[in-house]
Amino acid sequence: MNAAELARLQFAITAGLHFLFVALTLGLVTVVAVTQTRATWGRDPEARATGMRRVRFWGGLYVINYALGIISGIVQEFQFGLNWSGLSHTMGNIIGAPMAIETIVAFFLESTFLGMWAFGFQRLPARAHLVLIWLVALTAYASTFWIMVVNGFMQKPVGHETSDGVTRVTDWGAILTNEATWYAIGHIVGAVALLAGLFIAAVSAFHLRRDQEVEFFRPTLAQGGILAGVGALVTVVSGIVHLEALVGYQPAKHAVVTGEGPSLEEVSAAEVEKYGPGDWMPPDWVATSSLVMIAIGLVLLLIAWIPATAARRTDVPPSRKRVRMWLAVALLPFGFIALICGWLTREVGRLPWVVTGELTVEEAVSDVSFGAMLATFVALTTVLALLAFVDWALISHYARLGPAHAFIGGPDPFPGPRSPMDPADPEGRKGAEAGRGSDGADAHFTY
């Protein structure tokens, strides 16, 4: 193994683990935002209170994953700078702006909005608090968009020109509308919905198997199963469309993954004719990762919704529906496996290129010794492994404890001060106390 191969391995571990953090974060923040919207605008006091309990519970798990995911993103930035200086030197004029915007959106806007939301329970009006979680969700997806703009360009470089070894932008419109970006975004939206649905269903089933918090988790089991089923459908359909589009801009990957069209020898000869002597074909094992991803996607499309049927009959204790409860828990790891296989198919499938047809791995890797590369590999991989362990340990711990141990918000289910006429507080004491400052002047009321 040489320094370039070690840099590739380090990038695979760093970006792969970070992608898992991001995928669960995107799915959970959407669920939390929708749940809080229903609770905020609902009319039934009991349903609203239950809805906000769900916001606090799922929101707490989301905050854990987000916090540790941010740190893994910082680790990824370090390995970019340390190991891939050739990419920055050649393509910095194109990838620099989207990466800078993503940093501003993710590390500043999204984190600021999330902090205000997490500490805003009982401090902000309910509707302002609701706006914050939607801002968190929107900035999360905006961050993903800008990362995919960079990745889409690396898959299919458009809107550029190269002179004297430096690439410059000629058409930002072409870069922002790159089909390689938008096909992937559609695929990712489905995948994060699938993962979030599987996660919610698994946690719900864990408690329902023990007949714990039945009224709290029965609806979320159904919601998780349905969300997973819809996510699987979107993922499979967008994946099929995306796969067919590869013929136009990554024929070598398409040939290896599908085995359709011209033979591998013919495709390899066409690549040599286009780029000159060399091996321009991705490794054969990419076909295996793609096959595993497709197989899991199809299986989940067929069965991910089945646990939701266990929520229909309320006269039967959930613990008696053991097969469906077990299925909900057992399916969760396959969501993560499918995501990793999909990431490997997309990223490794363009090898030996870092930017397809423009920059190879050997040209992009930093000119550092094997020893220096090994040192960064050990250090950063250790940090990432620790982050992944802590993340899963904390999420598992609080998921098992249940909503009674939610650590964000407070005992009052509704964020912000209440109106004296709030139906959830008929005597108006809480609203009157919250609605007056120290000088006796009336403050704003939420409900």
Image (cartoon, grey):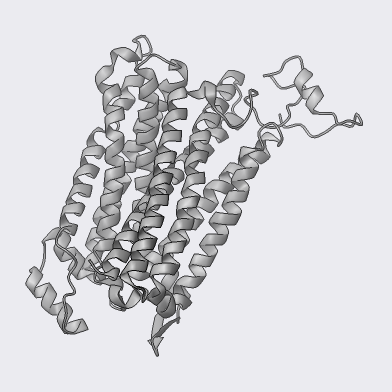
Note whether 155 is above or below 15 in the view shown: below
* Residue 317 sits above or below residue 171 on the image: above
| One can see residue 183 in this view | no
Which residue appears at 22% of the width and 42% of the height? 296
Image quadrant in which the C terminus is located: top right
- Apparent side of residue 109 relative to residue 444 in the rendered image (left or right): left
**Residue 128: quarter of image:** top right
Q: Position of residue 286 (x, y in %)?
A: 19, 58
Q: Quadrant of residue 396?
A: top left
Q: Is residue 415 above or below residue 291?
A: above
Picture quarter with the N terminus? bottom left
> Residue 39 falls in which quadrant of the image?
top right
Farthest residue in the right direction?
A: 439
Judge left or right: residue 113 versus residue 252.
Answer: right
Extreme residue toward the front, this view? 371
Residue drawn at x 57%, y 60% is: 104
At 53% from the left edge and 21% from the top edge, which residue is drawn? 404
Q: Is residue 318 visible?
A: yes
**Residue 354, horizontal then vertical, whole percent:** 31, 71
Determine whether, in the image, residue 286 is placed left or right of residue 179: left
Q: Number of numbered discs present?
A: 0
Farthest-out residue, bottom: 164
Residue 427's spot in the image, x, y percent? 76, 14
In this view of the protein, which residue sits in the foreground, 371 or 29? Answer: 371
Q: Is residue 205 above or below residue 124?
A: above
In percent of width and height, residue 219 lies at 43, 24
Residue drawn at point x = 21 percent, y = 39 percent? 299
116 and 379: which is toward the camera: 379
